Image (tube, rainbow, N blue to C red):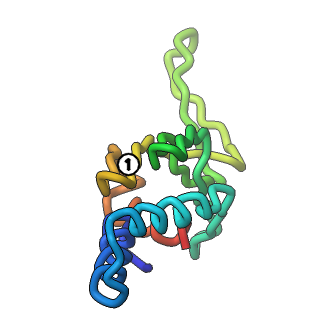
Amino acid sequence: LTRIGLHGLFGLVAKVLHLNCKLGKKKLNDLQRKIFAGLNVKSVIYDEKGGRIKFFDLDIAPEGLKITGNLGYIKQGIHSTYDPEKDTAIDTTDKNKLDYISFYLDVDNELLAYMTLPTLGRTKVLEYFSRLIK
């Protein structure tokens, strides 16, 4: 599933079912619901730089096969804040610095919507989704 994305995953399932099993739409919907119910939303993956990638703050609606939530990249880093009294920036080390994007997933319509960040671009977001839903 590396880089196949959710759209590709369910599209692939649909093709396999229709070409090999000749099952109807109801069977396809049943299989999609089983796959959706089996998603492990507590999964955590790690990158080569020691960062953790995970889903959090999820709102799951299994009857409609829809999820809203966040995908986060957590790693030790530095936060900067502004001190108006001293008119300067203050840098603070944080062992759980978080960069995250919000997303909306609609399995029925094979739709994944999200905004990117400089640290979480389109390629990384799709890679992380693919790895997290394995």
The picture places residue 26, in percent across and down from the top left corner, at 39, 63
Residue 86 picture location, percent across and down: 56, 15
Q: Is residue 89 above or below residue 46?
A: above
Indicate left or right for 107 with 70 as reference.
left
Q: Tell me how many marks there are.
A: 1
| Residue position for label 1 | 106
Residue type pointed to by label 1: Asp
Q: Is residue 60 in view from this perspective?
A: yes
**Is 85 situated above or below 89?**
above
Quadrant location of residue 124? bottom left
Question: Which quadrant, please, contains the C terminus?
Answer: bottom right
Report the residue at 64% width, 68% height from top: 50
User: Is residue 128 shown to the viewer in this render?
Assistant: no
- 21 to the left or right of 132: left
Instruction: Give the quarter of the figure containing the N terminus.
Output: bottom left
- In this view, 106 is above or below 52: above
Q: Residue at x 33, y 71 (%)?
A: 24
**Above or below 8: residue 53:** above
Instruction: Pick out the residue farthest to the bottom.
Output: 20
> What secondary structure is found at the residue carrying circle 1?
strand
Residue at point 69% right, 44% down?
Answer: 94
Task: Give the camera-side residue of 90 and 116.
Answer: 116
User: Percent from the top left, x then y, of residue 62?
Assistant: 54, 46
Graded by Cα atoms within 10 Å as few (under 14), some (14 to 19) or many (20 or more), the crowding at tag 1 reads some
Q: Nearer the viewer, residue 71 or 19?
A: 19
Residue lying farthest to the top in this orientation: 85
Query: Which of 77/24 is in front?
Result: 24
Residue sitting nearer the eye, 46 or 9: 9
Furthest toward the right, the residue is 95
- The percent position of residue 107, horizontal first and vertical second, equals 39, 54
Residue at x 45% of width, y 64% of height: 32
